[in-house]
């Protein structure tokens, strides 16, 4: 049975509210399947949906009702003004990570004025959102991206190719492939897993049942990966360099203390995100006395 656009939206909204999902997801999904802009969708509220569009839309709304993230259903997410393909092998890029990009670009400019070619590595690249964005925003960067997951790397490679970013991708665990390669880097950036395992019990199943646990959880306190970074960073960074981490809220003091202990000559800064939560830690290495 065919439905008018407004009927489809009303059904989706009430169904998703009942399931305690974002009732606005119906509009996002319908725009995806119709190809209409928001303005066009509202202008055509009384138009009938083609039966095949209604069928696809109904299936998608039911999927989201079961907890599948909208981004995985439509297959992409917007990040820094660009569309990135996402699927269940990669985390969905978050707006907070855009702030990590901004902070990194500002500090690279301050640390290395003049825009000379720099070696930058993105560790645990996932969808490639960080590495691709940095390469496109600052094309002179030589960007390397690593991930433990081959499926994630395949997605990142597709995004880099689609968006025209020339990046070297390496499969491997944290900084191990860089250590093996013997190259020293001017900047290391990472949004690693940082959620304590115990948090899984109260997190939304939209995240825990669908996004890859490999990219979410990191030990009892969420700091396991940062501890490993402290062992490996001195083996890959140049004497003067930048470390940029995304962290979980409340982890700023612990991660900054680790960096200060590892790099006694570093200037370490914890930066809050737009919501006022500590979300980024930046370390300028070899600059304190320079």
Image (tube, helix red, strand yellow):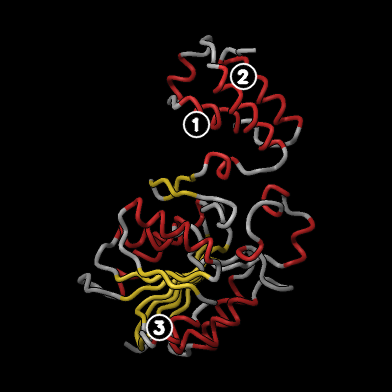
Q: Quadrant of residue 16?
A: top right
Marks 3 and 1: which is nearer the front?
A: 1
Quarter of the picture containing the C terminus is bottom left
Q: Quadrant of residue 10?
A: top right
Q: Residue 205 appears at what percent x and percent y?
A: 73, 49
Q: Residue 108 appears at what percent x and percent y?
A: 33, 70
Q: Are marks 3 and 2 in contact (CB under 8 Å)?
A: no
Q: Residue 97 appears at what percent x and percent y?
A: 49, 57
Q: Residue furthest toward the right?
A: 201
Q: Where is 224 relative to 63, above or below?
A: below
Neighbour tally class for label 1: few under 14, some 14-19, many 20 plus, Cα within 10 Å:
some
Marks 2 and 1, the one that precedes in the sequence: 2
**Where is mark 1, residue-wise?**
32
Q: Residue 92 appears at what percent x and percent y?
A: 55, 52
205 sits left or right of 159 in the view: right
Q: Secondary structure at mark 3?
A: strand
Gap in Å between the C-alphas at discs 2 and 1? 14 Å
Quarter of the picture containing the N terminus is top right
Q: Quadrant of residue 135?
A: bottom left
**What residue is rendered at 61% in x and 21% in y?**
9
168 sits left or right of 248 in the view: left
**Where is mark 3, residue-wise?**
285
**Where is mark 2, residue-wise?**
8
Q: Residue furthest toward the front?
A: 52
Neighbour tally class for label 3: few under 14, some 14-19, many 20 plus, Cα within 10 Å:
many
Gap in Å between the C-alphas at discs 3 and 1? 45 Å
Gap in Å between the C-alphas at discs 3 and 2? 55 Å
Marks 3 and 1, the one that precedes in the sequence: 1
Marks 3 and 2, the one that precedes in the sequence: 2
């Amino acid at each position: 049975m065919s439905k008018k656009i407004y009927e489809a939206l009303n059904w989706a909204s009430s169904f998703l509210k009942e399931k305690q999902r974002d009732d606005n997801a119906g509009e996002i999904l319908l725009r995806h399947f119709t190809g209409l802009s928001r303005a066009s969708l509202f202008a055509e509220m009384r138009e009938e949906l083609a039966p095949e569009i209604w069928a696809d839309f109904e299936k998608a709304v039911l999927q989201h009702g079961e907890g599948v993230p909208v981004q995985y259903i439509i297959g992409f997410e917007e990040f820094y003004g660009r569309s990135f393909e996402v699927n269940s092998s990669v985390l969905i890029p978050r707006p907070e990570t855009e702030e990590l990009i901004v902070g990194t670009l500002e500090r690279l400019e301050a640390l290395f004025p003049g825009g000379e070619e720099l070696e930058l590595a993105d560790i645990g690249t996932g969808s490639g959102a960080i590495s691709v964005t940095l390469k496109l925003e600052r094309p002179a960067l030589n960007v390397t991206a690593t991930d433990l997951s081959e499926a994630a790397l395949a997605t990142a490679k597709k995004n880099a190719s689609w968006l025209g970013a020339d990046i070297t991708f390496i499969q491997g665990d944290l900084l191990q492939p860089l250590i093996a390669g013997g190259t020293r880097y001017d900047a290391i950036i990472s949004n690693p897993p940082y959620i304590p395992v115990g948090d899984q019990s109260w997190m939304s199943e939209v995240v825990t049942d669908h996004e890859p646990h490999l990219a979410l959880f990191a030990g009892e306190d969420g700091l396991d990966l940062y501890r490993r970074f402290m062992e490996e960073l001195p083996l890959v960074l140049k004497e003067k360099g930048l470390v940029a981490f995304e962290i979980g809220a409340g982890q700023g003091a612990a991660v900054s203390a680790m960096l200060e202990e590892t790099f006694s000559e570093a200037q370490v800064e914890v930066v809050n995100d737009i919501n006022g939560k500590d979300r980024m830690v930046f370390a300028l290495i070899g600059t304190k006395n320079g």
